Image: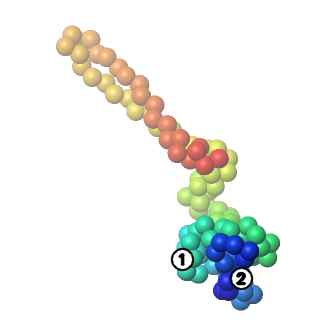
Amino acid sequence: MTKLKSKGGRRQIVLNDNQIKELEELARDMTIEQIADYFGITEKTFRAIRDRNITVLTAYKRGKAGGIREATSLLWQKMRAGDTASILFYLKTQAGWSEKQQLDITTKDVTPQLTRFNIMVIDDASQSNN
């Protein structure tokens, strides 16, 4: 990592070719915060480097895409093998499926008549990621 002299303010940090190759590997499974920590810089500095250097941006995006591709490939293998949890995960995250549970509660009032309540619990947590 080198620092280039700028026309004012702080010197710009630049990743060298080896660091850019390393970045592509790191981006497969690390967050921006973790990558910045690895290089010993702040998230803001890493984002600035990425935003001003198309080679860094491309390496970062290629690494992220590679990690996603690997994970989806493994998920598809498990789904094809009939793994129910993997199938449900895919349907919840990609097809908008959600699990709904119905809970029936019966209570006895002070009068001899019974009061019945129907409560439907809907977990919309998976919906917020769409």
Q: Secondary structure at mark 2?
A: strand
Please name the amino acid that badge 1 sits on. Asp
Report crowding for label 1: few under 14, some 14 to 19, many 20 or more residues within 10 A (C-alpha).
few
Q: Position of residue 38 (x, y in %)?
A: 56, 80
Report crowding for label 2: few under 14, some 14 to 19, many 20 or more residues within 10 A (C-alpha).
few
User: Which mark lies nearer to you, 2 or 1?
Assistant: 2
Measuring 66% from the left and 86% from the top, which residue is drawn there? 1
Measuring 59% from the left and 43% from the top, which residue is drawn there? 127
Measuring 21% from the left and 10% from the top, which residue is drawn there? 111
- Looking at the image, tell me whether mark 2 or mark 1 is earlier in sequence order: 2
Please name the amino acid that badge 2 sits on. Leu
Q: Which mark is residue 4?
A: 2
Give the farthest residue toward the front: 8
Q: Position of residue 121 (x, y in %)?
A: 45, 35
Q: Secondary structure at mark 1?
A: helix
Q: Is residue 72 left or right of residue 41?
A: right
Q: Is residue 38 above or below residue 98?
A: below
Could one spot residue 111 in this view of the protein? Answer: yes
Measuring 80% from the left and 72% from the top, which residue is drawn there? 54
Q: Is residue 61 above or below residue 123?
A: below
Q: Is residue 46 above or below residue 25?
A: above
Give the farthest residue toward the bottom: 18
Query: Label 2 vs label 1: CA separation?
Result: 20 Å
| Residue wearing tag 1 | 37
